[in-house]
Image (tube, helix red, strand yellow):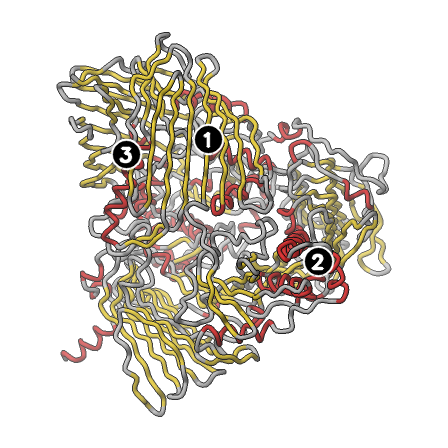
Amino acid sequence: MIPKTLLNLGAMCIFFLVVLPANAQDKDGMKREFKFGKVQPSEFALIPFAADTGATGLTLFDVGSCDFRLDNNGFVYVFERHVRYKVLNKNGLDLGNLEVPVFKGSSSSGKERISSMQGATYNLVGDKVVVTKPKKDAEFSETFDKDFVLRKMALPNVKEGSIVEFFYRIESDLIFTLRGWRFQSDLPALWSEYTVSIPEFFQYKVNLNGEELVKRGPTTTVNATYVPGVSSMAQNTRFVAENIPALKDEPFVTTLDDYRAQVEFELQGTHFPNDMYRDYTGTWPKIIQALKADENFGKYMAKRGYIRSLTPDLLRLNDGDTLAAVERIYHFVQSQVKWDKSYWRYTTYTNPKQLFEKKTGNSADINLALVGLLQEAGISAYPVLVSTRSNGAHPGYPIISKFNNVVALALVGDTSYLLDATDLDLPMGMLTFSNLSRQGFLCDLAHEEGQWISTSPTFSGESRYNYILSLEEDNTLHGKLVYSTLGYEGWRRRSGYRLFNGDTDYIKDYCEDKPGLTVSSCSFKNLDTLNLPFIESMDIVIEDHVEESGDLVYFSPLLFERTKENPFKHEARNFPVDMGYPMKETYRMLVNFPENYAVEQLPKGVLYVLPEERGSFRISLIGEGKQLLVMSTISLTKPVYTPEEYHELRELFKIVVERQAEQIVFKKN
Amino acid sequence: MVCAIGIAGAQSYDVSSIPEMLRKDAAVVVRQENQVFEVEGLKKGRLVYKLVLTVLNKAGDRHAEMAVVYDRFSPVSDIKATLYDAAGSPVRKYKKADIEDQSLVADYSIYEDTRVKYLRFLSTNYPYTIEYSYVQEFDGFLTLPSWRPISSFEMAVEASTFTLRCDPSYAFKQLQANVAVSDSAIVNGKKVLTWSSTQLPAFAHEPLSAGLDNLVPWVTLSPTAFEYDKSTGRMGNWNELGAWAYSLSEGTDVLSPADKARIQALIKDAPTDRDKIMRLYDYLQENTRYVSVQLGIGGFRPIAAEKVAQVGYGDCKGLSNYMKGMLQQAGIESHLVMIASGRPGLNPRYASVGQANHMILCVPTANDTLFLECTSPHYPMGYVGSSNAGRPVLLVTAGGGELAATPEYTAEDNFQRRHIQVRLDEQTGATVHITTAYGHAQFEGALGMMLTEPVEQRKRMVEGLGIPGMSLGEYRYVQADKQKPVITEEINLTSNQLISKGGDRLFLTLNLLNRREHIPTTLPNRKTDFKLEFQYTDEDEVVYELPSGYQVAHLPAAVAITTDFGTYSATFTYTGNTITYHRKQQMNSRRFAAGRYGDYVEFCKQVYQADKQKAVLTTSSGDKDI
């Protein structure tokens, strides 16, 4: 399921003018050596090439390693990073500032400490490299909150053309997920490498993104010593990337991280001497077993005491109407607790009772309580693990750490409903935009099994504008607008409406970007009936829209809904266009005009359909007597378009912009 | 019995007891606010604060938080917080673990010692009421609490009081408005001042507002003498405050012998003082960067110039002071300047810490006075940026503080002058060449673009120009004279959607790039004054060369508008096969009385109408796309 569109990036042909000099390099190009403090004058001549010539800085190398050691409480991993940048212009001066977040945690949660932090600045003076090292007073430790400390350093004498270098080492108890490595950043890089050395007692899963850019070396077995006097083995793997272009953002993507060359690790199992092999996350059933036994997942859901104390009517299946019960329970949770805006796959509480007492919680607190309630009512319900759009796509194979959220699924007969009770305006069966990441993993804790399910939306985002107007001789338009929104658009408008301090404020804001529009009265329908369209009806007057010159009167018939510019502006596209859900916009305007006006030739209608009906645009203008009917429909039928299909979208909207701009012209007599 | 109900009623947080007139336009209602500050000497103060606030709807959610800022001189204790439902019954009492403790480091700083105790109240149902209280002890203080019961739009107040208790000999200054001057009473040997307000209705949000200051009660106080982080001083007036600032910086501008030698080498053969200043300012821009560290009194005292020279970085104070030290070596006197950057300037009649938030350097020269912004690696010498221009500032001199003013950038200074040549062709569409010069405040935006990484630059331009059907060609930014805040931008592009059709006619919107697309919302009964923040002059000329066979059927009539908000003119001429559009808009930055708002909306409306005027064209060759 990972979109492998990095192929396009690979084809972008990035070369660098100069290759790294003077450093030892082995035969297969997988190994180079970099010594802290050893900077050659020739390194000051290194510059990026092609698309990245204007970059603010250049990563000369970025080398990391992750190794293990045994301390009093068990194994810790030791992460080291050695990075060297060249400052290409003044916008890159901040490369001289380092910030490293360190999880301070507690003895129970595990913690990290930074055991070395060094930096140096190099300037070329004549043909000599001058080194400046920071003093102690250039180091800072900011206690950010109860979990994190930010360790910082500001290097001296950083100027345009300087080379700056950092080294730091972090020791961490948090061995479930090792520190990953980003080979690609917003700076171009000449060399990036990461070596992990895993003791024979551990097995880790590797999630590598961007195989086009990153070479994965063979895993070799080496001798290692963790307990003095006892010889052990470790598995070494090296990942190397060379001449890596800067990663550049594009609109309409889930998260840029989905397209970044990077590697992540998660513990799969352990095999200690005198112990059997323990599989933690090697297979989905293992992952589900662990979730089932987790205080903040399965055990939380299993606690039903409080739920049973709730009013029995809530959980009763009247006449076997399961759908009504699901709806009632879903709405109950929605209205009882407020989401604290944090996503997580684990609860913060250990019992749903705490959630209903404190009235707030994270996504897992809320949605796992919902599953518990549904199950208690005898409804088939399951947690579904999700990685939100901004968290990046899940690679598909058994990795728990890539999930950062959990929603619920209820089965009613053969129909399944995805439920997310964190949002009061979300209709049953709809996931919020953030969760539209294509797939989720359904966990059947009872049977200790699970499966991937599609979370692609069954709802689209639909807007319908319906104007009934009359054009007066003073060239103002009077009449009515009925604006209905459905699916994701309905959700968006409802949520938006609630942010205002009453209708007056809301209408003020509605008119804000629509010059000439006055709303004299308005009414709203289905605000709380989430499964029906949200309907906004307004009595309106539009001034300053119809123009006059000589005996001609003309106006653009799409009023405030005209697509003035192509939303797909850029010529090139590397990544898929991911809008989350399909969309449709229907515009209809019926206008009566004065007796002494005569319509000149009306703009021609058009129907433009993309291959396989991936999208379409239709506009038609019909005149009869002193009445005109204008209809325009834009439809995008897919939530995600490939980079190739991007060009179709661009073409489609080019036609939309052109045709919607056409004027209706009257001749006055 | 009556009495008992009365007491219960007074303490109830039941939302139904809020009078209707306080609900109008309100998203939140301050039910009860009590702020008591006790001065127990220059080194010791104690704040006791309590707030009860009802949130009526979702629009008020942003007020449902507690954020108490503190540092090592002002620890916070005894925090209590409770959430109530609409009936006034407690829903949740928060525990210590629920209160977050976070560092509060400004995004421009690498390190500060300021922290915040933070709690966000979350309620599923509306309305709801929050209550919190805390005690804050001050070990020395530079400011006294201010009081502003209505701190934003859509906020009503049932009752709010501020009490100051101090020794009768304790001196402070005060500014206040729309509230009765507190009678001071002596209670238990202490002077007690109390300000209070009840039943204040809310103000609906108004665009372009100059604020509520002249409509709502407020009090601000400032000590006359103070002690803070082992430093003592007086700030009875700006002269005293400046004297204190001077005492902090005294001796910090000394440089090492090596630095002195380098400076002498730099200014050798410089013919004039101005040349010397220019060389040193250039040296500063090439060799330092902005790194901000603010710790206690370090928020006011510059890092030693010698240290800045050594590490090549500093904050606004450190860099200004380093420049001062360098100038001194060149025999040029200069003064550190306390300035309110990006907000209203210092109040000349009321000295207090906190009005200034930035430091620049003033160099008095024989002919004129130069101000130097020492944190920018890009500004021309003497250009301080629009956020620092035209405002009262304080020069920190050996004789104490001296009020002065930075130069104002006038509407003429902040110019945008544009010439566009458009060649319309039936086959290839429109070829467009745009040349724009940006000055002063408008130079800053162009500078930002000029310094942007090229791929991002192109992206922004494609997204920002707003020309339909555009295909962007070559472009460049040039700052011809590094000593002048002027940048020229040249853009080449093509478009085949400049002209829209309608029947057998063609419509051409003549103002290609600088249209007003927005009219401020009409407000029948505006209460607050409004402010036009930015003065500028935009001049646009667009020349359209029409293909042969095209005729102009209609050209709009010239427009000229003169108001005290600004002036506007647009002319349209047609000669040969060329349409020339000329537009000039000059806007003034000023505060206007609320009553003038309707006129301003009307002005904007006229500009909006004038900007979208179209030429109507006919063609002998029939239906063609351009």
Nearest-to-viewer mark from 3 and 1? 1
Q: Quadrant of the N terminus of chain A?
A: top right
User: Could you tell me how far apart the alpha carbons at marks 1 and 2 are, in whole angstroms?
Assistant: 45 Å
Label 2 chain ID: A
Residue at horizontal 33 percent and vertical 68 percent from the top: B148
Residue B190 lies, with reference to residue A546, above or below; the image says: below
Chain to which the residue tagged by mark 3 belongs: A
The image quadrant of residue A491 is: top left
Residue at numbered disc 3: A484
Dot 1 crowding, Cα within 10 Å, few <14, some 14–19, many 20+? some
Q: Which residue is mark 2?
A: A156
Residue A614 is at least partly visible in this image: yes
Provide residue B563's location: percent of width, then percent of height.
28, 44
In the rendering, at what x and y percent does residue A199 appear?
76, 50
Q: Are marks 3 and 2 on the same chain?
A: yes
**Does B439 sit left or right of A471 as displayed?**
right
User: Residue A198: where, in percent of width, then height?
Assistant: 75, 48
Label 1 sits on residue: B419
Question: Hey, what amino acid is under mark 1?
Answer: His
Question: Which amino acid type corresponds to the residue marked 2 in the rendered image?
Answer: Pro
